[in-house]
Image: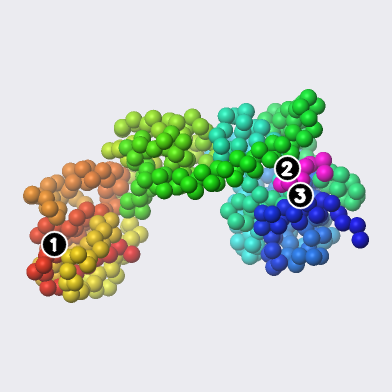
């Protein structure tokens, strides 16, 4: 029995990167083009020896003249192999215009959202795309020409987020085309792939052929190997530098900040990684974030702002860098609480619980002003009042020499103005006993003489 060399390559890639296993349900991103057609055919062959379930997903961007023909081809292919097919049409040109994206970015964003939602809906464990080694080489060259850093030069990962897999990432496009010819498999041609207005097409049609002609035919494989090496080293450096990077990241009240001072003490390479990690967290991804953007964050001055793609605005205030919130009216609320049942503050979407307990000794209490407070139960007057802050609010935090304006206390604690309404004020009678994120009031603190404690905890 003759072994299909391309199938053998696919199996090695799957095994090397642990892409698939028996029992996996694979949603194949199927455009009808040569790469996705070859991927489907190879997975069908693989299925004879590795029991996996297959389904197809086709996304129609409504951009090209032949888009409906591609859709019809996908339907016919699904019927031919008796596979379930999931379709979606969307006007990507309109979507891109509304959100200020280019066509390629908008198409990728909506396509992957469709794939992920469909995979979840049908219980697919993997999403397979037809990216090849040639796509990898193109990506590396594009990012090199754009001045990308180490992470960008790592190119296309064989597996992303544990479930988006690229089984053809170690196979060149000419091998895919040869396989399709040998099998006599039809596929759809995308005429936009010849449009030299697109950067990727110029790299594919002009730069790579030039490099192959003048610097050797193995340029695609060599660029792919470079991406692998850089990606592996980047993964190691990320893991090794994570403890130091975490020093510059601060989480308060469920909100993530960059500490400018801590950032300035890190070696430049780690500081850049910290910024990228932070941007990925607050933006959701790093698309359209450049090296210059990262450097701008490192240079951001006090009270200054930076604008990023996707309407993200970062502001540095009191040494903390965080997304600037859109101006809005502060949430107003007021609750009466007996301390027995849970307290739900619907306006903030937060919940608190209360508990009476014997005093175990101050050293045994886990103090955390951001979510927990302890009071001398005998000094409290129930029901407690929990409300939003008001002009003129004053209280004496634990250890303070006297009362101060709540506004000034919040300012000294570097709580951003836009977040201050999210710190509910707890009162016993008319006296403030605690503000979430700040110390309890001096008068109501737990001491060695306290017999019974009332604890409040944010759930």
Determine crowd level at label 1: few under 14, some 14-19, many 20+ residues with C-alpha closer than 10 A. many
3D distance between C-alphas at marks 1 and 3: 66 Å
Q: From the viewer's perspective, is the residue at label 1 or at label 3 nearer?
A: 1
**Magenta-drawn stretch contains 298:** no
Q: Is residue 261 above or below residue 121?
A: above
Q: Which mark is residue 36?
A: 3
Snapshot quadrant of residue 107: top right
Residue 343 image offset from top left, x and y in percent: 28, 67
What is the magenta range?
169-175
3D distance between C-alphas at marks 1 and 2: 65 Å
3D distance between C-alphas at marks 2 and 3: 14 Å
Determine crowd level at label 2: few under 14, some 14-19, many 20+ residues with C-alpha closer than 10 A. many
* Tag 1–tag 3 contact (CB < 8 Å): no
- Helix, strand, or loop for circle 3? helix
Question: What residue is shown at x 13% (from left), y 62% (from top)?
Answer: 445
Query: Which residue has dot 2 on it?
Result: 133
* Tag 2–tag 3 contact (CB < 8 Å): no
Query: Which residue has dot 1 on it?
Result: 445
**Magenta-drawn stretch contains 173:** yes
């Amino acid at each position: 029995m003759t072994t299909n060399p391309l199938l053998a390559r696919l199996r090695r890639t799957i095994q090397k990167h642990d892409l698939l296993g028996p029992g996996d349900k694979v949603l194949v991103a199927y455009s009808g083009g040569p790469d996705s057609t070859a991927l489907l055919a190879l997975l069908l062959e693989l299925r004879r020896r590795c029991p996996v379930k297959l389904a197809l997903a086709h996304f129609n961007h409504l951009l090209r003249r032949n888009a409906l023909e591609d859709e019809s081809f996908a339907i016919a292919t699904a019927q031919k192999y008796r596979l379930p097919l999931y379709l979606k049409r969307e006007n990507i040109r309109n979507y891109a215009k509304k959100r200020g994206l280019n066509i390629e970015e908008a198409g990728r964003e909506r396509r992957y959202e469709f794939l992920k939602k469909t995979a979840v809906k049908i219980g697919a464990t993997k999403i397979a795309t037809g990216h090849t080694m040639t796509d990898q080489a193109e990506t590396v060259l594009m990012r090199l020409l754009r001045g990308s850093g180490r992470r960008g030069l790592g190119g296309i990962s064989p597996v992303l987020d544990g479930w988006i897999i690229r089984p053809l990432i170690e196979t060149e496009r000419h091998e895919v085309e040869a396989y399709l010819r040998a099998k006599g498999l039809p596929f759809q041609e995308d005429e936009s792939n010849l449009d030299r207005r697109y950067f990727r097409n110029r790299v594919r049609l002009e730069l790579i052929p030039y490099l192959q002609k003048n610097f050797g035919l193995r340029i695609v494989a060599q660029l792919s190997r470079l991406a692998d090496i850089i990606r592996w080293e980047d993964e190691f450096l990320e893991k090794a530098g994570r403890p130091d990077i975490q020093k510059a990241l601060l989480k308060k009240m469920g909100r993530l900040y960059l500490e400018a001072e801590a950032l300035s003490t890190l070696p430049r390479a780690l500081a850049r990684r910290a910024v990228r990690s932070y941007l990925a967290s607050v933006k959701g991804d790093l698309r359209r974030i450049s090296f210059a953007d990262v450097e701008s964050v490192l240079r951001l001055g006090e009270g200054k702002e930076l604008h990023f793609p996707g309407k993200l605005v970062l502001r540095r205030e009191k040494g903390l860098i965080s997304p600037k919130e859109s101006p809005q009216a502060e949430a107003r609320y007021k609750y009466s609480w007996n301390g027995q049942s849970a307290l739900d503050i619907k306006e903030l979407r937060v919940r608190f619980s209360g508990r009476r307990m014997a005093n175990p000794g101050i050293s045994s209490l886990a103090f955390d002003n951001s979510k927990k407070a302890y009071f001398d139960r005998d000094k409290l007057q129930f029901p407690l009042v929990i409300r939003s802050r008001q002009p003129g609010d004053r209280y004496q935090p634990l250890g303070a020499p006297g009362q101060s304006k709540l506004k000034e206390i919040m300012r000294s604690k570097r709580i951003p103005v836009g977040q201050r309404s999210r710190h509910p004020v707890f009162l016993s009678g008319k006296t403030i006993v605690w503000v979430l994120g700040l110390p309890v009031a001096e008068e109501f603190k737990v001491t060695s003489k306290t017999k019974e404690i009332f604890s409040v905890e944010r759930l």
